[in-house]
Image: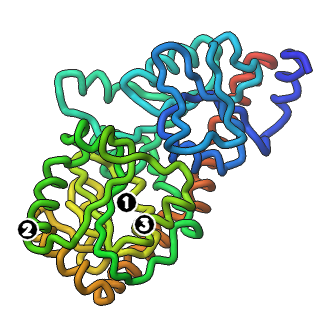
Amino acid sequence: MNPISYISNKINRVKKDKYKILTFSTHEAYQEAMAKTGHHFYLLQTEGCKQWNEDFRKLPSNCTIINNIEHIPYDIDFLLSQERYSQLQKMSGLSNHIRLPLIHLDHVEPVKNESFPALKALKADFNVFITEHNKESWENTDGVVISHGINTDTFSGWIPNTSKTVVYIVNYLKERDFFCGWKEWEYIKNKVNAIDPTIKFKLIGDNPGISKTISDPKELALELKKCACYINTSKFSPVPMSLLEAMSCGMPIVSTKHQQVAKLLNESNSISSNDLDQLADGIVNVCNNNKLYKSIGVNARNEILNKFSMESFMNNWNDIFDKAYNKRLGELNEIFYNK
């Protein structure tokens, strides 16, 4: 079908089963979840852009890498930016040039420095945030929140055990201390081992010289289920997906409480505090009395089932995609029929 026939056919439709969406390689685990919507995603990987890392997740079959901007298909339906500092500006220019609607998703919390006013002023046709705290931090009043979708079938089945192993899934923990809490991790680990040297700490993720990633979600879930509890020391993150996956497994969670995590965790579904000594004592108790903490793991899993289902995630994204497509149809009608 030639471009003119494509456009003339398109303006007579209200909805498509599968959209063609131009975006960037951003967060592999999130893109894998988004791919479950069934649409086809074209991931720009031109010079200076992030490259897809197969060590984090395998590329979904409905995702195609585009290494040259000239190879972008002419029948793209709309654009998706997933990073405000560079992607949104690039996509805004492209959106204006080829006259396609733009969706923007914020994954990260803003740094309130001198560039913040200009960054928060950047807007797309549709603005999406991963948590309410994230939306509030960007001081946005017209965007929508789409919570993460977690595969609760894969991430399930934890039972109390005697491993006395504490696990944390995070990439570049030491390099991203400001965000992920390397110093907190080290403090807690040293404090716990001073009390009980038989307790082991295990990192999973791209941490050079320390640990490696696990790209297969099923293998990752198996590793989680071997451990006594999961620790999260994040300080500046809307909500780590790895934390949600651990909660979905039904294992005891020990965590700091910052930003959206503070709204997610409570005394019934976790041992959570910003008092590192309290967290260290909690880990010792969990590892030595694993069965007693099964209930908080069950409550943590119920939190995921109730608020982070994959079905809701896909439905919410499909609603945004439909709105973006309908906006495009309206613009095509104006062009062709002067309506």
Q: Position of residue 69 (x, y in %)?
A: 63, 13
**Residue visible at 34% across and 40% down in the picture:** 108
- Quarter of the figure with the C terminus: top right
Residue 140 vs residue 113, the one in the foreground: 113
- Which of pointers 1 and 2 indicates the residue nearer the eye? 2
Q: Position of residue 260 (x, y in %)?
A: 29, 56
Q: Are marks 2 and 3 in contact (CB under 8 Å)?
A: no
Callout 3: SS: helix
Q: Which residue is mark 1?
A: 243
Q: Counting residues from the N terminus, which is met first, the one under dot 1 or under dot 3?
A: 3
Residue type at tag 1? Leu
State how the image is colored: rainbow
Residue type at tag 2? Ala
- Quarter of the figure with the N terminus: top right
Q: Which residue is mark 2?
A: 194
Judge whether 122 appears above or below 289 on screen.
above
Say which quarter of the image contains residue 151.
Answer: bottom right
Cα separation, mark 1 vs mark 3, equals: 11 Å
**Residue visible at 24% across and 36% down in the picture:** 175
Cα separation, mark 2 vs mark 3, equals: 24 Å
Mark 3 neighbour density, 10 Å: few (under 14) some (14–19) many (20 or more): many
Q: Position of residue 155 (x, y in %)?
A: 51, 67
- Which of pointers 2 and 3 indicates the residue nearer the eye? 2
**Residue visible at 41% across and 46% down in the picture:** 212
Is residue 139 visible in this depiction of the protein?
no
Q: Which residue is mark 3?
A: 224
